[in-house]
Image (spheres, rainbow, N blue to C red):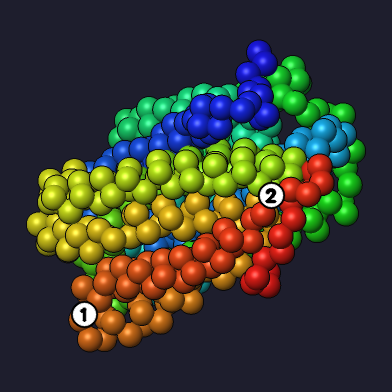
C-alpha cells in the first residue's frame, strides 16, 4: 500500500493539495469530533462542559510537547528526504518515537498527581470540580498513547503519506464519536466516558500505524533506523518555537478560563468552553493544510529551490485566508443557532453569542500566521518563529486578558483575544515581508543563498 507522493512534482499546486488535503480532512475530523464531544457533554448540563474546560489547559501543555517534537522531526525528516539521505531520515523517525514513551509516562504521572490542586487553584465551584476531575484523571492514563499517535501522524505526513494519516485520523475520530454516546449515556459513565472513548480510539490508531511501519508502506523504516539521541537537539531546535507557542497557548487558555470564572462565573466558563470548541473547529483544518504543505516547503528548502518555496507559500495564503474569512462570517451571522447546539441554557447562549462575534477578525489573521510559521520553521528561523508564534496566544494576549475585563467585564475576555490577534498580525506582516525578501535564488545545488535581515 504505497501511497507516497512525488515531492519533486513540478505541479506545485497539485502537489500541495495532494499532501495537504488529507491532513485537512484528518484535522477537520479532529475538530468535528471535539465539537460533537462538546454537544454530548453539553447534554449533561453546562456545568459538565465547563468543568472539563478547566482541565484542558493541562492537556494543551501535553499536546505542546507532542507538537514540538512532531514538527521538529517532520521538518528534519523532510529535509533529509529532500537531500536523498534515507538513512538519516529513518534515524530521525526512530529517535523521536523512542523519546516519546518516557516523555509520555512522565507527563501522565505529573497530570494525575497535580490535577486536584490545579483545578482548585482556578477557583472552580463544586459543580465544576467533580466532572473536571473525573475526566482529567482518566484521560491522564492515555497521554502516552496520544503522543505516540501524534508522532506517527507527523512521520507519515513528512514522508508524503498524508493520505494514510488522514484515513487513520478520520477512522480514529469516527470511532471516538461513536463511543462517546455509548460510554457517556448507555454505560452512564458521564464525563469519564468521554475520556475512555478517547483512549480506546488512540489504541485503534496505534494499531493501524503498527501495520503501516511493519509493512513498510512509508519512505523510511522506523524498525531499521538507528536511535541517535544527538538528533534530539536539532529536532528540539526546530520544534521548540512551535512547542513554546502551544505551551504559551495553554498558559493563555489557563488565564482565559480563570478570568472567565472570575468575571462570568460558571455561566462564563461554559460560554467560553463553547467559543473555544468553535474556534478549534475553524482553526484546526487550516492548521492541517499548513501542516501538510510544510513537508513540501521543507523539501524545497532542502533541495535549494527558492522559487518553488515561494510558489508554495503564495498558494497556501491564497487557499487559507479566504476560507478563514468565510468561517468568520458564518460564526458572526449564525452565532445564536450555533451556540444552541451545545446548550439550551439561555444565559450561556447569550454569553457565547457575544464571544463568537468577537472572534470575527481572529480566523483570517490566524491563517496568515500559520502560513508564516511554516515558512519560518522550514527555513530554520527558530527565533523569529517563536517571536511570531508566541504573540497572539501569549505575550500579547495575557496582558489584555488581565486588563480589559477590569474595564469591560466578561466581554473584555473575548475582546482581548481579538485585540491580540490584530496586533500579532501587524508584527507577522513586518517579519514575513522581511523574510520574503531574504529568500533569493540558488547559487549552488542544495543551498539557498540570502541571509535574513532579521536575526533568528
> How far from the left and from the top, in percent, is residue 23?
51, 34
Nearest the camera: 336 or 12? 12
Q: Nearer the viewer, mark 2 or mark 1?
A: 2
- Please rate how many residues cluster around mark 1, counting C-alpha atoms within 10 Å: few if below 14, some from 14 to 19, many from 20: some
Residue under numbered circle 2: 441
Residue 116 x, y percent position in the rendering: 49, 66
Q: Residue at x 71, y 24 (%)?
A: 218
In the image, residue 42 above or below residue 208: below
For label 2, the crowd category at 10 Å Cα-Cα, with few meaning under 14, some 14 to 19 and many 20 or more, is some
Write the residue at 16% across / 58% down: 353
Q: Quadrant of residue 392?
A: bottom left
Tag on residue 409?
1
Spatial CA span between label 2 and label 1: 52 Å
| Front in this rendered view, residue 1 or 78 | 78
At a point 81% along the width and 42% down the height, the residue shown is 445
Residue at the left extreme of this rendering: 346
Q: Is residue 301 above or below residue 400?
A: above
Earlier along the polypeptide chain: callout 2 or callout 1?
Answer: 1
Q: Is residue 366 visible?
A: yes
Residue at the location (48% across, 76% down)? 395
In the rendering, at what x and y percent does residue 219 appear?
75, 26
SS for dot 2: loop
Left or right for 390, reference 273: right
Amino acid at each position: 500500500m504505497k501511497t507516497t507522493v512525488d515531492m519533486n512534482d513540478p505541479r506545485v499546486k497539485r502537489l500541495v493539495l495532494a499532501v495537504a488535503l488529507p491532513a485537512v480532512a484528518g484535522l477537520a475530523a479532529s475538530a468535528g469530533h471535539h465539537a460533537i464531544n462538546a454537544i454530548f457533554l453539553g447534554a449533561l448540563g453546562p456545568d459538565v462542559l465547563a468543568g472539563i474546560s478547566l482541565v484542558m489547559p493541562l492537556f494543551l501543555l501535553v499536546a505542546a510537547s507532542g507538537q514540538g517534537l512532531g514538527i521538529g522531526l517532520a521538518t528534519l525528516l523532510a529535509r533529509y528526504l529532500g537531500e536523498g539521505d534515507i538513512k538519516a531520515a529513518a534515524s530521525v523517525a526512530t529517535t523521536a518515537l523512542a523519546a516519546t514513551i518516557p516523555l509520555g509516562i512522565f507527563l501522565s504521572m505529573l497530570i494525575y498527581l497535580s490535577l486536584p490542586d490545579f483545578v482548585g487553584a482556578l477557583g472552580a465551584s463544586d459543580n465544576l470540580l467533580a466532572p473536571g476531575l473525573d475526566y482529567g484523571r482518566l484521560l491522564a492514563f492515555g497521554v502516552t498513547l496520544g503522543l505516540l499517535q501524534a508522532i506517527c501522524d507527523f512521520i507519515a505526513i513528512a514522508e508524503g503519506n498524508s493520505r494514510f494519516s488522514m484515513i487513520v485520523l478520520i477512522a480514529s475520530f469516527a470511532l471516538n464519536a461513536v463511543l462517546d454516546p455509548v460510554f457517556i449515556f448507555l454505560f452512564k459513565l458521564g464525563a469519564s466516558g468521554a475520556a475512555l472513548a478517547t483512549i480506546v480510539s488512540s489504541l485503534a490508531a496505534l494499531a493501524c500505524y503498527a501495520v503501516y511501519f511493519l509493512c513498510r508502506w512509508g519512505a523510511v523504516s522506523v524498525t531499521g533506523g538507528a536511535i541517535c539521541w544527538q538528533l534530539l537537539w536539532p529536532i528540539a531546535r526546530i520544534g521548540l518555537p512551535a512547542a513554546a507557542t502551544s505551551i504559551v497557548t495553554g498558559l493563555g487558555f489557563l488565564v482565559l478560563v480563570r478570568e472567565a470564572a472570575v468575571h462570568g462565573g460558571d455561566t462564563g466558563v461554559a460560554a467560553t468552553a463553547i467559543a473555544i470548541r468553535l474556534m478549534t473547529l475553524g482553526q484546526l483544518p487550516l492548521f492541517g493544510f499548513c501542516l501538510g504543505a510544510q513537508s513540501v516547503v521543507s523539501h524545497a528548502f532542502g533541495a535549494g529551490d527558492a522559487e518553488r518555496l515561494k510558489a508554495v507559500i503564495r498558494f497556501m495564503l491564497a487557499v487559507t485566508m479566504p476560507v478563514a474569512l468565510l468561517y468568520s462570517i458564518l460564526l458572526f451571522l449564525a452565532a445564536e443557532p450555533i451556540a444552541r447546539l451545545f446548550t439550551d441554557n439561555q444565559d450561556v447562549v447569550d454569553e457565547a453569542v457575544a464571544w463568537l462575534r468577537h472572534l470575527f477578525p481572529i480566523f483570517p489573521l490566524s491563517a496568515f500566521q500559520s502560513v508564516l510559521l511554516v515558512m519560518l520553521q522550514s527555513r530554520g528561523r527558530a527565533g523569529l518563529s517563536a517571536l511570531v508564534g508566541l504573540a497572539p496566544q501569549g505575550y500579547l494576549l495575557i496582558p489584555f486578558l488581565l486588563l480589559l475585563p477590569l474595564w469591560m467585564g466578561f466581554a473584555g475576555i473575548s475582546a482581548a483575544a481579538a485585540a491580540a490577534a490584530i496586533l500579532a498580525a501587524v508584527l507577522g506582516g513586518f517579519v514575513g515581508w522581511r523574510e520574503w525578501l531574504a529568500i533569493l535564488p540558488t547559487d549552488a545545488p542544495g543551498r539557498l543563498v540570502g541571509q535574513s535581515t532579521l536575526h533568528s
